[in-house]
Amino acid sequence: MINMKKVKHILISRTDNIGDVVLTLPMASFLKQYYPEVKVTFLVRDYTVNVVRLHPDVDGVMSWDQLSAMPKKAAIQFLKKAQIDCVIHVYPKSKVAKLMCDAGIKYRVGTYRRVHHWLYCNQWAYFSRAKSKMHEAVLNLKLLKPLGIEDLPTLDYLKENFHLKTNIAISDKLKAYLHPEKFNLILHPFTNGHTREWPVSQFNALIRQLPKEKFNILITGSEKEAQNIKQRIAAQFPDVVNLAGKLTLFELMRLIENADGLIANGTGPMHLAAAFGIRTLGLFPSEKNVDPTRWAPVGKKAQWLMVDPNCQAPRCKAFPHCLCMESITVDQVKSVVMEWC
């Protein structure tokens, strides 16, 4: 067990994707509840730095991209200067764990199921993500047990108490995309190949069926997805606002925060929308560890759809498409959205 009287600065390492980072942010709040004087810093990739800065209980952010680019001696010196007493490896990356060990950080927490954590950590949490039926946001908090925090919140508690807010006025550029008298609905159809996807044909059918007098529809996506979105979606709908590849991550966050609702597969923008407290609908397959049991959006106005909990269709192996995603009907999605406005 860690002697928390000697811990004044904790580093939380989560060097993967936006959604994963969003669902790790409640860890900062729980640390502050138990140890209000402790400094909490996140180690993340450059493109998620602005996400972490939105959380009121995070005191600092370190860039893994910058740290990993340094010569080893310089990186170690940088970490020593930061006076970190404890690092929590939420995302188990061997290179990060070794560097923290080499830097001589006194307490190094990781899951016992990773071999490199046997080598580079000295405090372990004993649980299996693959076998767990808990939500990712709750599972992350199990890593706080070596710090004396054993009581885990319910997912309902997190939904009521976890949120993000920028406290920055929206720019004129983004405001121009939002209609003052319609329901501003963001559709984020792709996932950069990270998970199963609802078919484009069904997103298109949804756009056709939503009444134009009620909805202002905006399409978002990455720069890599922009051409695909332009050809397969935007070209068919001149009234839709196509923003794919045109926004920075910070602009996307501001747009989401000021929109009225968002529909997406289980990806980062879905988790951002839920955390910002807008209407959110996540579309999920039934496959274990990518289903809503593990990855449902966490927010007061967040919802999700998954049709067949026992789907064993062979096409489910044809990533990212599967029959259980296709079985989520346009009518089901439309029914949810029509209740929002």
Image (tube, rainbow, N blue to C red):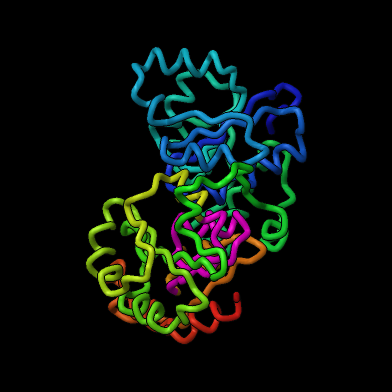
> Does 258 sit above or below residue 303?
above
> Does 81 sit above or below residue 31?
above
The answer to if 310 sits in the magenta stretch is no
Residue 51 image offset from top left, x and y in percent: 52, 43
- 224 or 82: nearer the eye? 224
> Which quarter of the rendered picture does the N terminus lie within?
top right
**Furthest residue toward bottom:** 331
The answer to if 258 sits in the magenta stretch is yes
Q: Residue at x 62, y 23 (%)?
A: 85
Residue 151 image offset from top left, x and y in percent: 74, 50
- 234 or 204: nearer the eye? 234
Q: Residue at x 67, y 27 (%)?
A: 39
> Does 254 sit above or below residue 301?
above
The part of the chain drawn in magenta is 256-285
Decide if residue 50 is on the left or right side of residue 71: right
Residue 239 image offset from top left, x and y in percent: 36, 71
Q: Quadrant of residue 6?
A: top right
